[in-house]
Amino acid sequence: MVVMDGAGWHQDVSELKNISILKLPPYSPELNPIERIWRQLKQTSLSNRCYKGYGQIVEAGCAAWNALVAEKDKPCSLVACEWALL
């Protein structure tokens, strides 16, 4: 199963065989926890910077990810939904 949000590059799935597609409703970031991780990375490490090339972008992304996961409870706290714990 592949879970997709409504991003434009996720639209053409007609060629996928033997894969179930679950499309999330529009404007529902609470159902797509990785969006909260990306927001955190962009806000703290990746936005408002100029990179000289693809290699620098990848390096900055990896450094930001490694810094995030080095904080033991940070990733879980970003994706947890209090309303889902009922």
Image (tube, rainbow, N blue to C red):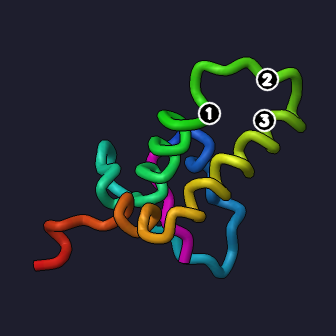
Name the amino acid type tagged 3. Answer: Ile
Residue at left offset 43%, top offset 62%: 74
- Rendering coords of residue 82 (x, y %): 18, 67
The N terminus: image quadrant: bottom right
For residue 78, what is the image quadrant?
bottom left
Judge by depth and name the residue closer to the eye, 71 or 76. 71
Name the amino acid type tagged 1. Answer: Leu
Give me the disc on residue 51. Answer: 2
Instruction: Look at the numbered disc 2 and give the secondary structure of its residue.
Output: loop
Distance in Å between CA atoms under marks 1 and 2:
10 Å
Instruction: Look at the numbered disc 1 and give the secondary structure of its residue.
Output: helix
Q: In this view, does 48 lie to the left or right of 76?
A: right
- Rendering coords of residue 9 (x, y %): 62, 43
Q: Give the range drawn in magenta.
A: 1-6
Marked residue nearer the N-terminal end (3 or 1): 1
82, above or below 53, in the image:
below
Q: In this view, does 66 lie to the left or right of 51?
A: left
Was residue 2 drawn as part of the magenta stretch in this picture? yes
Residue holding disc 1: 46
Q: In this view, does 49 lie to the left or right of 72?
A: right
Question: Which residue occupies the extreme front position in the image?
Answer: 71
60, above or below 78, in the image:
above
Are the two marked residues, 2 and 3, in contact with CB atoms closer than 8 angstroms?
yes
Name the amino acid type tagged 2. Answer: Tyr
Was residue 72 drawn as part of the magenta stretch in this picture? no
Distance in Å between CA atoms under marks 3 and 1:
9 Å
Give me the disc on residue 57. Answer: 3
